[in-house]
Amino acid sequence: MSFFQQLQQQTAAERETLFAAPIIQQALAGKVALPSYIAFLTEAYHHVSHTVPLLMACGARLPARLEWLRGAIAEYIDEEYGHQEWILNDLAACGADPEAVRRSQPALPTELMVAYVYDRIARHNPVSFFGMVNVLEGTSIALTIRAAGSIRSSLGLPPEAFSYLNSHGSLDLEHMDFFATLMNRLDEDDDRAAVVHTARVVYRLYGDIFRGLPLAA
């Protein structure tokens, strides 16, 4: 079994707990309120705005033996740069104030998730960052495939309100193939353990973000 497959298997329980969040179950059933979607995009803005800084922090701390991974991080940075602005555009299309969101504070689980991954990079193993990648991209793909259509139809918003969800469905499918290839090249037990542990914790924290979003009446 490849390491990527082991990673999915070893984090299955945490993944199922995340998808059991009431707001996700409502989304899958096509019951989404506009305040819920705006709250989701707001928290997405706050963690997506850290994607490139986290990639840079990870790349800066990788040892020479993982130079090949530093090159992959450069590709990720090029792909991910500026995506938080897409989210602000979506918020504007929803009738929200994007500048107010930019100035706002993240919810506590969002702040803790981002801080946790910075800490794992700085004090433990920089490869830990890829545990977060596994969670966020895997969840984005699942939500887009399983719920994006019902969210769009239930809210009746213009296509301009869904650039983040729409783009990340197809983009993250490509990323996940690339990600699997990278993970399967990791051959040190400590690196693999760092990715699995971080993924498990991030599933918990990301789930807390979803559980904190307002539910439809």
Image (cartoon, grey):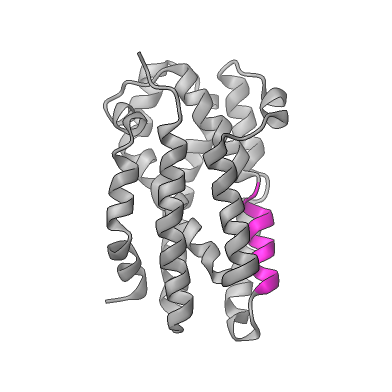
The image quadrant that residue 187 belongs to is bottom left
The image quadrant that residue 144 belongs to is top left
Is residue 168 a member of the stretch shown in magenta? no
Residue 157 in sight in this render: no
Give the left or right position of residue 197, taking residue 117 as reference.
left
Residue 36 in sight in this render: yes
Give the left or right position of residue 143, taking residue 86 as reference.
left
Residue under the point 45% across and 23% down: 36
Give the left or right position of residue 197, taking residue 99 as reference.
left
Direction bottom: furthest residue: 65
Residue under the point 70% across and 70% down: 60
The quadrant the N terminus occupies is bottom left
Which of the two residues, 138 or 165, is positioned nearer the viewer here? 138
Indicate the position of residue 41 as horizontal and vertical percent values.
54, 31
The image quadrant that residue 23 belongs to is top left
Q: How many marks?
A: 0
Q: In this view, does 84 lie above or below 50?
A: above
Indicate the position of residue 34 as horizontal and vertical percent values.
46, 17
Q: Is the magenta stretch mostly helix, strand or loop?
A: helix
The quadrant the C terminus occupies is top left
Indicate the position of residue 102 as horizontal and vertical percent values.
70, 31
Indicate the position of residue 18 as horizontal and vertical percent values.
35, 44
Q: Which span of residues is magenta-colored?
A: 50-61
Q: In this view, does 68 lie above or below 121?
A: below
Residue under the point 61% across and 54% down: 79
Q: In this view, does 23 lie above or below 194?
A: above
Residue under the point 53% across and 34% down: 163
Which of the two residues, 164 or 97, is positioned nearer the viewer here? 97
